[in-house]
Every structure is written in C-alpha cells, then in structure tokens.
Image (spheres, helix red, strand yellow):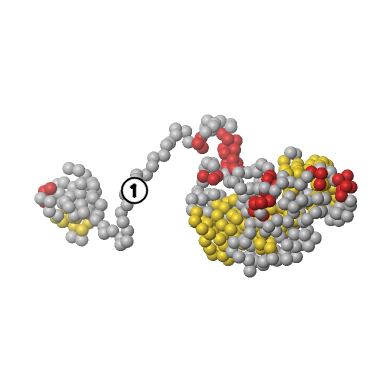
Amino acid sequence: MRQHKQSRPHPHGHVCCCPCHRHEERCHYEPRCRCGGPIVPPCRCGKGPHDGECPPPDRDPHPGTVELPQDPPPRFPTYPVPPRSTGKPPTGDPGEVPWFRGQVGGITVRGPKFGPRKDEFLPYLLVRTASGDRGRRPVQGVFWESPDIYIDPDHGAVAAPLLPPTTGGLARAGRPNTLYAHVWNLGKAPAYRVRVEFYWFNPSLGITRADANLVGAAYIDLQNRFTTYPTWTQAEGPSGAYASRGSHAIVRCPTTWVPKFENNGHECLVVRAFEPFLDAVSPDQFNATADRHVAQRNIAVVEATSPAAIDLSLDLGYIDHPSDVEIEVETAPPSAMEWLKLLDRSLVDRPAPPAGGIVAGLLGPVAAGVAPARLGDVGFDSRGTLLQPRQKFHRGCERLQIGFHASAADLPRENTQVFRVRQSRAGDVVGGYSVVLTSPWG
C-alpha cells in the first residue's frame, strides 16, 4: 500500500479512506486504521482516496476576463562555463585575487555587460546634431548646427504657440524670444519626467559649463521607440503643455529669453535632455560631439543687401591643460549647410557669390574682454591683408578670444555664402561656429 502523509486530526479522530472501508470515510481515534494499515486520508477534491495527484479545483472566471492560450516559456541556452568564470585562474592561484578585483573594477567603471545600450530595456534620449542622427558618438563633422533647436522671435513664453511657427526663426536682440527643442527617445522603454534644459552662451568655439547661462527647464514624457502618433498631440507635463508624437516631442521653454545687444542676437544655444535615473548626463557635460543628450546651435545669419558684413568676437573656452590649437575658416556653398533648409529651402539652391567679392578670415588671439577690432570701417580692398584663414598657436591657462570678420562687397540678389569657423586640438574639433551671409529672401 502506498505510503501517504497522515491526515489532519479530526475533532473526533483521524479521517481514513483506506480500501477496507469500501471507499467510505471512517474516523479513527488512533493514527492507524483498524485493519493495521496506515491512515489513508481522503482526497481534497472529495473524489476517493488521495493518490498523490489532485485535479485543480474548479474556479469561476473573474468577471470581465477571458482565458487566452499562452505559449510555454522559452528555453534559454546554457553554457558549461558561466561568463563570470571566463579566464578565472584556478582556486589558490596567486592571480585569483587580482582577477577578481579586475572583474569588480570593470563593473564599477563600465557597468555590467547587457549588450548594446540601444537594445536594453531603457530609454535612449537624443537631441540630434543633424538629420539622420541616431545617437552614435563621437560625431564626425559639423555638430553645432542642430536641427532640433528652434526660436520664435518677438514672442514671450506665455504668448508663444505650442509649436514654433517656423523652424528657422532668428533671435532678435533686446526683444522677447521663446526657445523650443525637439527631443527623441530611441530606446525600448518609455521615459518619464525627462528634463529639458535651455542655455545660452556668448559666441564661442569651446562651450563649457563655466560659461553656461540657464534660460529655463521643462519636463516631458516620451513613449518607447515603437510608439508614434500620426499627428502632433497636446500633452500636459509639470511645466505645462507640449506637443507629442509618442516617441518624440517638441517642448517649449517656459522662460522668455532676451538676447544681449552687444552680441546682436548671435549667441550660441545649447539644449540638454536627460532622465536622471535611467538615462542621465553629467552636470559638466556640454559637449555635443561626445554626448547624445546635448545639442548646440551656433549660427549667425546676416541678411543684408550689398555690402554685407559681420564682426564677431569668438571665445575660445577653457582647456584642461596647455596645448597647441588651430583655428581655421572654411568657406562652403549653401548646399553644404543642411540647416538652411529650416530657414528657407530656397537658400540651399542659391549660388554662392563670386569669390572675388568675398573677404573672410581671422584676427590674432587676444585676452578675453578686450574690445575686438572692427573692420567694417576699413576699406574693402584692405581687409584681406589683415585677415588670416588659419591661426595656429599655443594655449595656456589664460582665457582667450579671437576675432572673425566676413564681408561681401557685392552680394548679388539671391546669393548666399556660408563660413564655418573651427577650433581643433590634437586633431580633434572641439568647437565651431557658422556664419551665413545672404541677400534678402522670402
């Protein structure tokens, strides 16, 4: 006879259902049956003696639910040697302790290995440096002409619309302006309470936290990368309404920005978007070429009939140790600047003015705060002798700035010229600024 666990004591003894009772339950005062065999407790289902397996009890389905067929759970492959044991010295080997310290140090510095960051179940926030940007860093090429930073001039933050009226708005000095940012989530997990920060900087070729001027910050929620709305939908956040399309959104800075007169509205703009716990960014990180959470818009547009001219004093920022740097000016056709499509698509198709009518270059570096030279009062034919296309020098710890001048003696109608100024250090571009000279459009 199969051995079974004894039944719980009944108030009047032990309930037994062994075959000697002809499948009738009997109650015994002793823990053994009168036939000499052990107590055979009845099945909890009430259908005869306990045989070791009971069918599941009948349950009424919960109202409003349905039973859906489910596939069995997947089987994951196993390996004879766990990853944590790869390369591990034998027990007692002198290298066992250094190996273990290296394993712990690797986790502390780089984090555990779960696969590519974009494929983890985490948010993957991005403010683009160019169209087609998917967050790969460092960026190769121009990174200071972000298509995700917009300006609505002549409107304060209270009166500004939910979406910018134009993606190519230009700041107006001494007037109220509203900033916008287009933020993306390319991760598999949604991101809640994403903080979007808006900053302005004096015209600079080396943006760092030391020169940051916070305009304001807003908060938004973003769905995962698989969620896209067919149209822009108004959503509400802690800082007010914003326009959402699921995995990406356009958010309006809740604080009005008034650019300085001395820079004529040509300040640099920086946006940072991050989620503090699951997709954070360092408080000191303002480098758009190295971090996908950061984007820069360092662009000056001069719309004028002939002659068109601009004088800019460009800050060189801070460096962590003395080194050689190179500042150079590149002259580019309108078609090379993708951002012009946001301003006016027709500008991209415009021809560049004749090379003989354009002067652009750099003055020598000077200490920060020194009033820059203005070449607008110098004869056009003499300006070229004062300018250099490239300046190479050694930088120490002192703060420096460099003057940039560009002018067109004869800017024909429907002509546009683009200049890009770069600062390079040890072969790496650490900052840039773009200048556009264009005849009136629209």
Please give the name of the residue rendered at 81% of the width and 54% of the height, measured from the top-left corner.
307
Amino acid at pointer 1: Gln
Label 1 packing within 10 angstroms: few (<14), some (14-19), many (20+): few
Q: Position of residue 325 (x, y in %)?
A: 79, 42
Residue that sits furthest to the front in the current view: 413
Q: Quadrant of residue 111?
A: top right
- In what quadrant of the picture does the C terminus appear? bottom right
Q: Nearer the viewer, residue 331 or 222?
A: 331
Please give the name of the residue rendered at 63% of the width and 66% of the height, measured from the top-left corner.
160
Q: Nearer the viewer, residue 10 or 382?
A: 382
Q: Is residue 299 left or right of residue 220?
A: right
The residue tagged 1 is: 70
Residue 434 visible, this orientation: no
Q: Is residue 264 left or right of residue 385?
A: left
In the structure shown, which secondary structural element does the residue marked by tag 1 occupy?
Answer: loop
Please give the name of the residue rendered at 73% of the width and 50% of the height, measured from the top-left corner.
416
Q: Position of residue 141 (x, y in %)?
A: 68, 42
- In what quadrant of the picture does the N terminus appear? top left
Relative to 201, residue 132 above or below: above
Please give the name of the residue rendered at 72% of the width and 45% of the height, measured from the top-left corner.
333
Q: Quadrant of residue 168?
A: bottom right
Q: Is residue 250 left or right of residue 326?
A: left
Q: Position of residue 279 (x, y in %)?
A: 57, 51
Residue 345 visible, this orientation: yes
